[in-house]
Image (cartoon, rainbow, N blue to C red):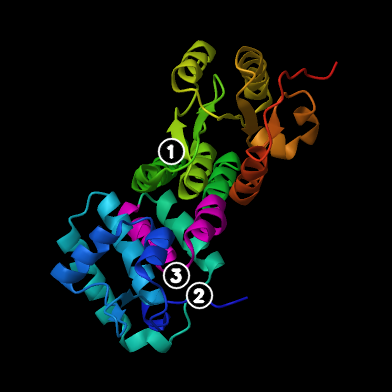
Amino acid sequence: MAQPITFLQLTTTPIYNTRAVARETGVPPDTFRAWERRYGVPRPERTAGGHRLYSERDIAIIRWLRDRTAEGMNISHAVMLLTSALEERVAPVAEETRGVAHLVDELVERLIVFDGPRAELLVSEAFALYPFERVLLDIIQPTMVEVGERWHRGEINVAAEHFATEFVRRKLAGLLNVFENSAQRETIVVACAPGELHDIGLLFSSLFLVRRGWHVVYLGPQVPLPDLLATVQSVRPALVCVSATTIETALEALEVARAVTSSFPQVHFGYGGRVFNLNPEVRQQMPGVFLGADGRSLISTVSALFARPPVASHESPN
């Protein structure tokens, strides 16, 4: 497995054109070209014909600036912090850098003691070191699992668990706003089942979808069935995704599935969540398609789903 890398350890070989950078970062070319003109970052090289070519380091820097501005930071302040961070890393660049497990451990420790600023720095470092989706699946998601487990074991109180959850929710929601304007594909409605309060997994799913160009209508936790049906009637999505984490909310999701598939047979229906991952037998009662245990499986399943027409009617097994 490749070792993690800092900004300074990323290659500066100019190989990516402007279109590739925009695709990899979700940042419009006009935006990062403006950063280059005003602040000197990124620093692409030019071909003999005058076209810009960007390096892996340039892409990491653009991602980092994207995330800071998405959180509300002024771009000039973000560049100042970036410059300071790079200067501080010049001396210790040869030191061994931290791996994913270390980042998870430290992020957990910072969150459970309400240290938001340090947690923020750790998340920023993670996005600088690793690909976007690996940060979500291998750092942020395991962090939330560990926080939840510590709460269940009585090692932390509800306040600490809530702080960690809200920190991650704000981060994911901010990233969702960054990517949602680049939709080029079909509309997908995503919602928690009625009574389902846990929406972190749903935010993960939404981010994976918007980064692949789908237009996501995110409804959040505990969406009442009549309101969900009214939304489907209004926006006419190609797919409705519903999440549940407990047996109780899985039963609510079952009612949603039956209502959507009977009222809107032309619309695909998909479902997912912790309860379906841990109890595969629960899926046997559900109309529609199980979307997978994580974001990578979700994308594969949704892509395959759109490759075939929806079934005219769905009946759950007796």
The quadrant of the image that shows the C terminus is: top right
- Label 2 Cα neighbours within 10 Å, binned few <14 / some 14-19 / many ≥20: some
Near-viewer residue (252 or 303):
303
Please report whichever mark, 2 or 3, sits nearer to the chain's N-terminal start: 2
Residue 211 in the image: above or below residue 12: above
Q: Position of residue 172 (x, y in %)?
A: 41, 45
- Label 3 Cα neighbours within 10 Å, binned few <14 / some 14-19 / many ≥20: many
Q: Give the range drawn in magenta.
A: 115-142
Q: Position of residue 125 (x, y in %)?
A: 39, 66
> Residue 289 sits in which quadrant?
top right
Question: Where is mark 2, residue-wise?
Answer: 4
Tag 3: residue type? Leu
Asked if the residue under mark 3 is in contact with the one under mark 2, i.e. CB atoms within 8 Å, the reply is: yes
Tag 1: residue type? His
> Looking at the image, which residue is at 48% across and 27% down?
221
Question: Where is mark 1, residue-wise?
Answer: 162
Which numbered disc, 2 or 1, marks the residue closer to the eye?
2
Tag 2: residue type? Pro
Of all residues, the one furthest to the right in this rendering is: 318
Residue 27 in the image: above or below residue 226: below
Question: Where is mark 3, residue-wise?
Answer: 129
> Looking at the image, which residue is at 49% across and 16% down?
233
